Image: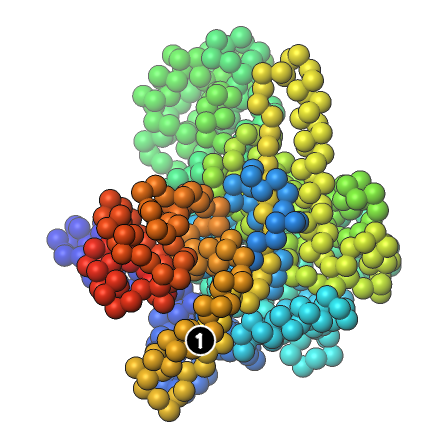
């Protein structure tokens, strides 16, 4: 409750609270000025209710369709690719997903909604005829699959966005809008978004993110010195890239400032007076702003000079606090003892608070450094302009802590996965990555493309996966070398891996069922049940059980790093106990649930039970519903 309302003896303003809650959940329904846009609210109920009128807002051709596309359900699933996975037993949630990123984000939504702590993306910058995601998949995953088949055989590509197109910026904005709307759904309440971009679309991207994430949650625009070379043919040689940073809820970080800071590196700390509390650094004892209770004289004990705060400034603390600091040997007067007062800040205190980052990042590697690094991994230059791992590591250090999930849905060469692996190894903090990359066909139109093809890489996603495979293999070799040393023989070696998934059509034929608009919902439900009975039984018997489990659990809110063990006490059916980081259930994918299983489920009636609806006759379904209530999920 606001302080003013308390002092006015007012009861809570429930209308204001409800509006603030609505804005926190759906900031895209509000204008740039923070006012609710009733038309956007009406569009959720029925788009036909809205007649478009002119107002101050960020609009472009295709915006409404892009939003509808973002919130349209997906019929796709993710299929485990065991052959290309690396050390899956140590993956612990690490995934590289080969697929179109919008549909992939939708697939992740049920299980990973509000679970992701950090999103780092390096999207196409919309220049130099870059490929963009044209969202041709409106009729479902079948369009995507047909495209993928073309990519795998004929080398088809998605789209190019030419400046000669009248919808040059609109095409790019539509592509970004739908994906960022879903990205916000995946971020948890303390989540942070980092987006790299150049001047070409920075202005538009800032307005886009202000609308989706709320301008109040904008943290800042970092300038990263991305190239040290100078282009003499240009009027101005561009040497930077922007990094826009948004928070899901900036207020959280305002109240918990140390949660968004870099580790203190100790630079500038020393102990010239052998203080038993250790190294320290002298901070100014003067602050800006005039405060009457922080205006007093301080006398230098060596020179006798009396100091007052500069005009318009104040001492950092009130006089009594200053006196206690002086008595505690925390006030110094410069190196020689003859300067203005300063306050000691000890390294131990700095390490506890962390280090505030600035908006100019010029100490990091450049894209040239990253290219050399990647070339050393592959032995050839197979990818243009990768991001350096220390750029992403710095982002992760700011916000990603123990067991946090890091997402990158413009995976490229896989730098985000590489950076996460390296950082986890360095600081022994477990983080999990999900990297999504479209299986874009590599062409021989560039020298890099030719080299990649010569080295056997047909798709960008091949490079994404292979890079991180080699990174892990290099670490394993280094760890094996350490184990051979007597000094490190007792140290547990660093182990990691990742699972590969592919975006694919659902394992359940029912997704192809089209309801008859001329029939009632009850009639269509009966038709669907018949369709399932005729089509699915034989089909499911031929599908890999692992893929069925993954799809069912993913769409019922379980993370893909679930554990699966055969449950005890079942004599007729194979029932498995499933557990992920947050919840657990029992699941049985057999075509018939035996009567004995009903009795045996009594010992597990506190757990969710998932099964096929066609495995239950009317009596069994009623009995299970009576036993389990809402914990029965039959589909």
Residue 552 visible at all: yes
Spot occupied by residue 605 in the image (x, y as percentages of width and height): 24, 49
Give whichever of 437, 219 is nearer the camera: 437
| Quadrant in the rendering for residue 319 | top left
Residue at x 57% of width, y 11% of height: 272
Number of residues whose C-alpha sits closer than 10 Å to that of mark 1, classed few (under 14), some (14–19) or many (20 or more): few
Spot occupied by residue 169 in the image (x, y as percentages of width and height): 63, 73
Spot occupied by residue 289 in the image (x, y as percentages of width and height): 42, 39
Residue at x 37% of width, y 27% of height: 317
> Is residue 531 toward the left or the right of residue 169 in the image?
left
Give whichever of 297, 247 is nearer the camera: 247
Give whichever of 59, 578 is nearer the camera: 578
> Is residue 605 toward the left or the right of residue 237 in the image?
left
Q: Can you identify the residue that label 1 sits on?
A: 534
Residue at x 27% of width, y 52% of height: 596
Residue most toward the bottom? 518
The quadrant the C terminus occupies is: bottom left
């Amino acid at each position: 409750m606001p302080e003013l309302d308390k002092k006015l003896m007012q009861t809570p303003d429930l209308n204001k609270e409800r509006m603030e809650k609505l804005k926190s959940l759906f900031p895209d329904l509000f204008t740039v000025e923070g006012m609710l846009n009733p038309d956007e609210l009406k569009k959720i109920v029925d788009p036909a209710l809205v007649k478009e009128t002119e107002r101050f807002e960020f609009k472009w051709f295709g915006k409404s369709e892009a939003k509808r596309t973002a919130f349209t359900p997906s019929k796709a699933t993710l299929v485990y690719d065991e052959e290309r996975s690396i050390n899956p037993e140590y993956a612990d949630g690490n995934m590289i997903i080969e697929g179109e990123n919008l549909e992939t984000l939708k697939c992740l939504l049920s299980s990973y909604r509000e679970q992701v702590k950090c999103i780092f993306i390096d999207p196409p910058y919309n220049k130099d005829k870059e490929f963009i995601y044209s969202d041709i998949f409106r009729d479902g995953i079948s369009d995507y699959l047909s495209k993928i088949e073309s990519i795998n055989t004929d080398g088809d590509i998605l789209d190019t966005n030419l400046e000669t197109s009248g919808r040059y910026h609109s095409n790019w904005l539509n592509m970004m809008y739908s994906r960022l709307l879903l990205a916000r759904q995946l971020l948890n309440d303390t989540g942070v978004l980092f987006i790299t971009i150049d001047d070409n679309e920075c202005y538009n991207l800032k307005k886009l993110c202000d609308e989706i994430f709320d301008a109040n949650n904008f943290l800042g625009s970092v300038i990263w010195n991305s190239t040290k070379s100078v282009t003499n043919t240009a009027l101005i040689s561009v040497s930077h890239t922007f990094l826009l940073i948004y928070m899901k809820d900036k207020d959280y970080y305002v109240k918990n400032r140390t949660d968004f800071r870099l580790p203190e590196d100790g630079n500038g700390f020393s102990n010239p007076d052998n203080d038993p509390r250790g190294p320290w650094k002298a901070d100014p004892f003067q602050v800006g702003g005039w405060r009457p209770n922080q205006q007093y004289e301080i006398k230098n004990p060596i020179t006798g000079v009396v100091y007052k705060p500069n005009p318009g400034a104040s001492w950092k603390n009130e006089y009594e606090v200053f006196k206690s600091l002086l008595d505690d040997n925390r006030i110094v007067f410069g190196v020689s003892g003859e300067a203005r007062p300063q306050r000691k800040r000890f390294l131990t205190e700095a390490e506890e608070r962390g280090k505030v980052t600035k908006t100019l990042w010029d100490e990091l590697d450049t894209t040239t450094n990253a290219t050399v690094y990647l070339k050393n991994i592959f032995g050839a230059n197979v990818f243009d302009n990768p991001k350096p791992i220390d750029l992403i590591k710095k982002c992760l250090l700011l916000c990603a802590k123990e067991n946090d999930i890091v997402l990158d849905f413009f995976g490229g060469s896989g730098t985000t996965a590489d950076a996460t692996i390296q950082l986890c190894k360095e600081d022994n903090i477990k983080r999990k990555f999900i990297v999504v990359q479209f299986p874009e066909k590599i062409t021989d139109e560039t020298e890099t493309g030719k080299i990649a093809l010569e080295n056997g890489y047909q798709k960008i996603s091949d490079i994404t996966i292979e890079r991180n495979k080699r990174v892990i293999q290099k670490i394993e070799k280094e760890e094996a070398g350490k184990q051979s040393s007597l000094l490190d023989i007792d140290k547990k070696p660093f182990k990691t891996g990742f699972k590969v998934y592919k975006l694919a059509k659902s394992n359940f034929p029912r997704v192809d069922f089209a309801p008859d608009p001329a029939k009632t919902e009850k009639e269509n439900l009966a038709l669907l049940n018949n369709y399932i009975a005729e089509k699915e039984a034989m089909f499911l018997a031929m599908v890999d059980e692992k893929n069925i489990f993954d799809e069912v659990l993913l769409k019922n809110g379980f993370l893909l790093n679930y554990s699966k063990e055969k449950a005890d006490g079942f004599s007729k059916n194979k029932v498995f106990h499933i557990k992920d980081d947050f919840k657990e259930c029992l699941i049985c994918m057999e075509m018939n649930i035996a009567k004995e299983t009903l009795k045996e489920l009594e010992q597990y009636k506190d757990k969710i039970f998932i099964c096929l609806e066609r495995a239950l006759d009317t009596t069994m379904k009623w009995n299970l519903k009576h036993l389990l209530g809402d914990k029965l999920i039959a589909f």
